[in-house]
Amino acid sequence: MTLEGWVPQINDYTSLREVVDFAFDYRGNTTVVKTNGKEVVGYIFNREADAPEAFLQLFDEQGDGPFTIPYRDIATIKFTGKDTAAGNSWKAWVERKEMERALRAAASGADRVGRDPGPDGA
Amino acid sequence: MSVPVSQMYTVASYILQQKLRRRKRYPFVLMLEPMFRCNLACAGCGKIQYPAQILKKHLTVAQCLAAVAECGAPIVSIPGGEPLMYPDIDKLVTELVKHRKYIYLCTNAILLKEKLHLFTPSKYLTFSVHMDGLREEHDEAVCRDGVFDEAVEGIKAALQRGFRVTTNTTLFDGASPLRMREFFDEMMDLGVEGMMLSPGYSYSKAPDQEHFLHQTRTNQLFSEMLSKPKRRWKFNQSPLFLRFLMGKKDFECTPWGNPTFNMFGWQRPCYLLQEGYAASFQELMDGTKWENYGKKSGNEKCRNCMVHCGYEATAVDHTFSSLKGFAETVSVSLSGKL
């Protein structure tokens, strides 16, 4: 399951703290929408929800930073970047290896049939 | 055990100093991650899944050295990412050797042969080559054919030039004890100084979530693999840690034993869990709620973890905490019976 594409609405059911936690755990870029309407795209690598002034930290899309943004300045966070932990490359590798094994098994089976003289020795 | 005497002496005197100072928590190995970029994408690895701008970034040598000084651990392990892709790896190693730190440069060895000329053999520098088993198992674990053979070539070239070389092996569910015993023979035939073993940790970000070992299965696998160990097998790690993996000892995790520093700061609480970052080593030590981690804490993320970065420090500390622990370590080391 991936949160890629999620645009949460902060309301009574979804708190900003929860959304920041999800964004912190997300291995892709997100877009932090500030209360003043400005947006910052980047990778959130840290958050301190229990600090006297709760904040998150990110590196922006260019890799500059770290930038610190207080929770009170955040309206929401959009999960806009690709989820790099989605695991597709490994799945593709496993599928390819399984295909190779099946082909090898089929080839060795065909080889045995070709060499097998059969019950009557023909 | 195959750790050289000078290294054992350094580690022993460091730990005794900590004991004399009555330091309750002290670091044993600094895990220094200069960058996350890698030339492989292994199934069990949760270290490299980052957006492009993060993978392009790396620490400076000055930042690395500041972290080493701040931490004070006698051993510096350089994982990653692939550290041989770090553009200043030669400068970093040279500086660490000057500071008399024992370095374990953890590499998949794909670039080892090509980059060996950047380094000078030293008792302080060990190439710790990632080898997850014999050819078939290793290539499958790293998701690329041919890597085992490249690593073997790298190991041979490094040994030929007089470098210290060890292997580090992560084991997952489905590993065959018999095949692993063949693997130990093959590595010793190559001439490596010693081998390091650990069960894998179930990184939530790793692509393969199905094959991480649970505690009972870990005990079973390591017992079968290490029962009646051949005398020629050398392990570059605490024998008590191996006994722990076999289920013969019960240890609690020492999450502060192998603190981790990378471009995000000091990772809380350990090398495997990423629950936030501290701005300084002191902040990491003083501000982390250590009671929330380890098996006793009941933390679900720690329940099945038996990884060396949490438990080897416990095993080493145990050796120096009592005469009994010391005697046990000496006895196992001399007899070779785990």
Image (cartoon, coloured by chain):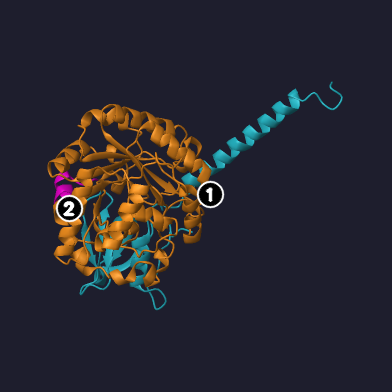
Chain colours: A cyan, B orange
Q: Position of residue B106 (x, y in %)?
A: 31, 42
Judge whether residue B61 is colored magenta.
yes
Towards the viewer: B108 or B280: B108
Q: Position of residue A89 (x, y in %)?
A: 47, 44
Question: Disc 2 or 1, which lies upstream in sequence?
Answer: 2
| CA distance for labels 2 and 1 | 38 Å
Q: Which mark is residue B67?
A: 2
**Residue furthest to the bottom:** A12
Instruction: For mark 1, give the secondary structure.
Output: loop
Q: Which residue is mark 1?
A: B174
Q: Amino acid at mark 1?
A: Gly
Callout 1: chain: B
Q: Amino acid at mark 2?
A: Ala
Q: Is residue B150 left or right of residue B316?
A: right
Callout 2: chain: B
Towards the viewer: A117 or B179: B179
Label 2 packing within 10 angstroms: few (<14), some (14-19), many (20+): many
Residue B280 can be seen, yes or no:
no
Q: Is residue B29 above or below residue B255?
A: above
Residue B226 can be seen, yes or no:
yes
Nearer the camera: disc 2 or disc 1: 1
**Stretch in magenta:** B58-66
Instruction: For mark 2, give the secondary structure.
Output: helix
